[in-house]
Amino acid sequence: MEQTGGYAERWGLDRILPRDLYESLKPVRHGPGRPIVRSGDPARDLLFFVEGRAKAYSILENGRGILAAFYRPLEVLGELELFTSDTYALTVEALTDTVCLVLPSAAVRASVDRAGRLLAFLCERLGRKLGERAQAESVNLRYPVERRLASYLLAASDPEGRIVGTDDLGELADFIGASYRQLARAVRRFRDLGILDGTRGRIRILDRERLGPRAGDRYDR
Amino acid sequence: MEQTGGYAERWGLDRILPRDLYESLKPVRHGPGRPIVRSGDPARDLLFFVEGRAKAYSILENGRGILAAFYRPLEVLGELELFTSDTYALTVEALTDTVCLVLPSAAVRASVDRAGRLLAFLCERLGRKLGERAQAESVNLRYPVERRLASYLLAASDPEGRIVGTDDLGELADFIGASYRQLARAVRRFRDLGILDGTRGRIRILDRERLGPRAGDRYDR
DNA sequence: CGTCGAATAGGACGGATGTCCTATCGCGGA
DNA sequence: TCCGCGATAGGACATCCGTCCTATTCGACG
């Protein structure tokens, strides 16, 4: 059963999955730029994202996108759709080489009575995601871009100022729901203040301290 | 055990709850304007909202609010926090006389192994809420207020044009993430076009057909 | 019926944001 | 090294939007 390369144990999936489900886990790999699940495709699987980085997004009718989240292990994909929907809501795209352990959704639904731990785990993840989305929505909707940028940088950087999420302005614009142009203006102001640095669509934090007062509510509360 | 007034059976809670949890359900009533749960309070209970109407909202540091949802039975409150958080994220306020059947969260957490059906049910509700929030966020963030108004009216009205959600412009402004003023401008334009009617902060749909082309993505997909 | 007060409708203005477009930059190839 | 192309930085402008303020309206009450 080491076809899952030890990932299942490392992330404790052996403790939350009934034995039969645990044994039916299958690893699936995707390289950078490849879609792991695609919005609108039949939601047949529940996936445990155990290796690499990925981003989740959706595209609206008017062609504009929302970058919903950046994923790193451990993450679950397809849990939103498990009891709710036939098709995936978001496209999740690998940013690096990734590994997912895959379980057919139908098998999970069929073992509800034995899968209390798994379902509790999924409730926890869903609760967390819902909380995060609600918070991000509020911030995106109720603060100007400059404050959103400050919020993001605080939420996505460590104390030394290294950015954990994305430092790509294009992606960031989609994430905080702004145009590239407007985000660039905010970056410019922060650069003039000596808070940020960077060129060619990338940014670097110079003075994390001074971001706080400019941030308002944060994305990660 | 008819202290729950038949609500538990009507909504099928007897089929998803283990016997001991089912028997510990307690009805709680709240009148209009009363908070059912308050943002920031300890999240001690899981509540089944079985009677009346309510609204859920949060307030940001800058004093601005987000109206997250309107609830009518059957709805679940506190499921987001069940495995995730110590405190309620949103304030839920009764709009009419309401009844909730209440279960201590700790009791639910303690019966994970027996509560597969309940947890599956909660996963379904969470998945639905998450999907709805994500969709609403996208629309709010990526379309101008006029299109959001059209989207809302389509999502919240029946084919004859009766509004199911709120017809109060103040509440609606919070819900779609706009200022009252800006929403009023959009209402004005639609009124000039003969699509809407109404005064004193209330609206009525005259011509539902013509909303479609003005809507873009909808809140309820 | 007239008056008063609270709430609504709408004007004025400035700021925030998006779109479009151009100048500039950086890198790869000749 | 120089040239050319794709990408980035930033200007110009129109629109969307929020805040502030005032006129108007509706209803309650005398």
Image: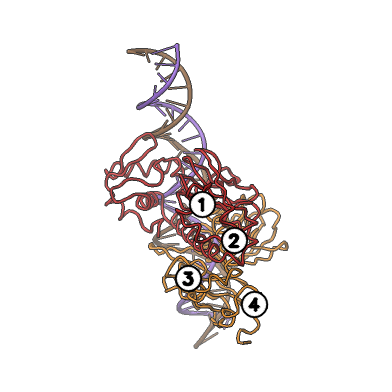
Chain colours: A red, B orange, C purple, D brown
Q: Which numbered circle lies on residue B128?
A: 2
According to the image, label 3 marks what residue?
A: B91
Type of the residue with mark 4:
Asp
* Relative height, residue B147 to residue A124 (above, below): above
According to the image, label 1 marks what residue?
A: B141
Crowd around label 4: few <14 · some 14–19 · many ≥20 (10 Å): some
Is label 1 or label 4 in front? 4
**Residue B189 relative to residue A121: left or right:** right
Type of the residue with mark 3:
Thr
* Residue under disc 3 on the same chain as residue under disc 2: yes
* Relative height, residue B66 to residue D27 (above, below): above
Label 3, label 4: how far apart the Cα atoms are: 27 Å
Label 1, label 4: how far apart the Cα atoms are: 40 Å
Which of pointers 1 and 2 lies earlier in the amino acid sequence? 2
Which of pointers 3 and 4 lies earlier in the amino acid sequence? 4
Is label 1 or label 3 in front? 3
* Relative height, residue A66 to residue B115 (above, below): above
Q: Going 34% across and 52% down the picture, which residue do you hit?
A: A154
Crowd around label 2: few <14 · some 14–19 · many ≥20 (10 Å): some
Which chain does the residue under circle 4 lie in?
B
Quadrant in the picture for residue A170: top left
According to the image, label 4 marks what residue?
A: B14
Type of the residue with mark 2:
Arg
Which of pointers 3 and 2 lies earlier in the amino acid sequence? 3
Quarter of the image for the C terminus of chain A: give it: bottom left
Label 2, label 4: how far apart the Cα atoms are: 22 Å
Which chain does the residue under circle 3 lie in?
B
Q: Going 53% across and 40% down the picture, which residue do you hit?
A: A30
Disc 4, SS: helix
Crowd around label 1: few <14 · some 14–19 · many ≥20 (10 Å): many
